[in-house]
Image (spheres, helix red, strand yellow):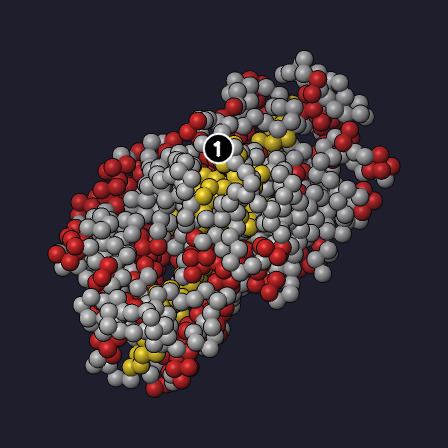
Amino acid sequence: MLTPHYRVPSLLVILLGPILMAASRAAMDSQALYELEKEPAYWDAQARATLDAALRLRPREHQAKNVILFLGDGMGVSTVSAARILRGQMDGGSGEETILAMDTFPYVALSKTYSVDKQVADSASTATAYHCGVKANAKTVGLSAKAVPYECNTTFGNEVYSVLRRAKAQGKSVGIVTTTRVQHASPAAAYAHSVSRSWYSDADLPSSAREHGCVDIATQLVTNVDIDVILGGGRMYMTPKGTPDPEYPTSNSRKGDRKDRRNLIDVWLKAKPNKKSRYVWHRKEFDEINVKNTDRLMGLFEPKDMRFEVFRNSTRDPSIVEMTEKAIQILKKNPKGYFLFVEGGRIDHGHHDGIAKLALTEAVMFDRAIHRAAQLTRESDTLTVVTADHSHVFTFGGNTPRGNPIFGLAPKKADDQMPFTSILYANGPGYVHINGTRENITLVDYYDEEYMQQAAVPLDAETHGGEDVAIYAKGPMAHLFHGDELDPLYWNNKGRNALHTALNKPRNSHQAKNVILFLGDGMGIPTVTAARILKGQLERKSGEESSLAMDSFPHLALSKTYNVDQQMPDSAGTATAYQCGVKANYGTLGVNAAAPRHNCQASHGNDVTSVLHRAKLAGKSVGIVTTTRVQHASPAAAYAHVASRDWYSDADLSEEAVQNGCRDIAYQLVYNTEIDVILGGGRTYMFPTTYQDPEYPTVKGARKDEKNLVDEWLKNKQNAKYVWNKADFDAINPATTDFLMGLFEPKDCRYELDRDPSMDPSLTEMTEKAIRILSKNPKGFFLFVEGGRIDHGHHATMAKKALHEAVEFDRAIERAADLVSDLDTLTIVTADHSHVFAFGGDSPRGNPVLGIADTQATDNKHFTTAVYGNGPGYKIANGSRPDVNESVSTDNNYLQQTAVPLDSETHGIEDVAIFAKGPMSHLFDGVQEQSYIAHVMAYALCIDPYVDCQLPEANHAVASHPSLLLLLMSLLLITFYPI
């Protein structure tokens, strides 16, 4: 049990227990919850409960009897976050605090989605990867990458086999459930081998395919594997050409499609005469199925795909929840167990249509199916995995307040003085221009079920995204999910090696001597993926297969980023959460949510204390390193308590703040906590107005109080140095320097692409110097390192600058790993928030991540694969968007195009990743509130409020074992084929 050093008010303890349960939170009045969230004790109690659960969590290391694989087609992390808010708002809450069924899964990983031949994958090749364990080419299912799309003769000898098929061979029952046609790419990879995902029936086969003996997907559905339960759409591909559909008898487009005149439904029914098999096409018949005396069930409820959930006729068609329940009830009768694949397939279709309401409603219903499955199964014998095949170029942001309707408008108008929705797409059919400007959405019903969100680039169908997607897992072996290619042996060996590493990965349950918190400001998951590709391409590789330093961290979680008063967070409220353990209001630093922004008087008495400050009190050395000004919101939460993140110097204080005795951030940097190492920008806020900057003589100091805060910091310190240029920085000897302040620019440091290496050190160099100085303390250290200009590059819609900042940030992580030991150093990498940044566009493998898409848009102009939902990159030339080419798009200052014009691109609202390694890093799991990060750091260090943690000190005789992120197949290989 945890032993907190302080006491929570008894009334709050009574209230918080049930509030932390999802049902109670959903039912609670939003205003009442908001008032509770103002109390630090609310967040402390919540984090302690989560921490206690994580400490009690033990891996289930026995064999799984059953496996359920839930696949949200196109369900990227941004879709999950938006669906969470929608679910909460449908239940009457503000939404952000809602907990999805998948959020409760204890293990989370990220999955790289690229195909062998495509940077941005499709559902066929990804299905081959997660079903069969082998990456493949786009458009192909159940085949290795030696098979060429559409070339039938390359099928034979290149087949790869799914876990479903292997489970059947082991005597288990198997089933597929989907909201698409059952011949769709995602379920098809479980049973079929086809060089074209579109060969649904024999009518779709070209003559060359028939001549070479290729078989359509529908035929393979009933002949390749004896599948016990098949539920979804796709009737027309199963019956002879011209057969009237039972539901739409007069519709010619829905009649049977098969040229071979076979009735594949009858073939399936007669395949197992000794078993009780049933076929249904109507909800009434489906409901009448008695699972006790039904061994096999095929239900095909639409000629093609099933209807979107918002249009589903509940008297005719069952929901995905009902189909999942029926499948489990039939399959679980097998004493040997079962394998079930469940696809929420129309999430993808809603996004392709540019209609977020359709996509997100599908995602909510998909999560309800996950919840229902949990009620019908036992975690002790059933491995449940939830993941996606790929993402979409779907973004949502826009400076929205807490509880803003997910399909509603952003609170402020765009630069063209027209409103915009918080949800936007980077490309797609929602691009509409009237008289040379985007459509005024107040003239349409943007809450309509078929409203198409605006897009930056016009395409007939919105494209997939290229970023990593999440894997959520629970049950036996779920802990294994944490973080020449034509040959399937390559992928099988890669998966087995990752699995072997995971199985042999020991937990480090020692006390941490040191903690390093790396914060990539604005580094959402799309940024991580794009930076990985860029890093590889800078090394003259294709890029997609590259690994970042953070990719090697063995433990991963997702962090919910909202502020107490804002749906879309800022770097101040989030910094208070991860530095101090308490969620706060937008724009405030080091104070709880009882302090409104800009209100100095209200902030008094509402201070919250950072882990950095507590580490210093415990005798550790502490430091901050940033590429922004050192008074920036992210580092400032480590030492300051202010009602406004903008109060950099006393010249920035409001009249009310001066009257009520509030101090500026720079002042607090020097006087609040004795920080041993301070490296970054921000000179101007430290010196009086009479001060002349040494690098830019025309730049003056900002301080009206005429204080020289650098001199104040140097006072009474032994072995203390101040530097402002690279030469002086390089001359610093860590062995003889105990305190170091380096301020290399008047405000923020320069972008990495613009940095003068003769004048300014890199983030990597600053990180190394900080560690070498801090690590001399035998009691250990706490270091905060921020890659702060990732965020600034995104705000400017300069993707090149943002991504190069992210690559340099990762280099700093790699260098830190060389200088410390995982045995005694907890290292965490995370972000404060994301951005409305996306990359997609059907780009081939190795396409420059900052380059041009392979095809033109519907306006016959080129577009970049990297695009933003909103921002200053919105341009109209001669009544339409300008064309773009490689020479333009690769310029360091190129602004990516956007859907909505804003002076500054906005943050995104979706979850961000937490990567962790070292002592107690296993406590990062699942989906957590951002404030949880500070509690894990404090617990690992055994500092306030966890001074009695009683963790053993690290044993340096033990070797550490870093791990790679696992492919989904890695786990499923051992489930059925132990190594």
Badge 1 is on which residue? 439
Residue 45: x and y in percent read 27, 51
Q: Secondary structure at mark 1?
A: loop
Residue type (three-letter) at the residue carrying disc 1:
Glu
**Residue at the outermost right position:** 211
182 and 477: which is toward the camera: 182
**Residue at the outermost left position:** 659
Residue 167: x and y in percent read 64, 44
Residue at 76%, 31% (x, y): give it. 204
230 and 434: which is toward the camera: 434
231 and 819: which is toward the camera: 819
Residue at 69%, 20% (x, y): give it. 253
Q: Quadrant of the N terminus?
A: bottom left
Q: Quadrant of the C terminus?
A: bottom right
Q: Quadrant of residue 846?
A: bottom right
Residue at 40%, 36% (x, y): give it. 419
The answer to whether residue 210 is seen in the rendering is: no
The answer to whether 904 is drawn above or below residue 372 in the figure is: below
The answer to whether 917 is drawn above or below residue 319 in the figure is: below
Residue at 62%, 38% (x, y): give it. 859
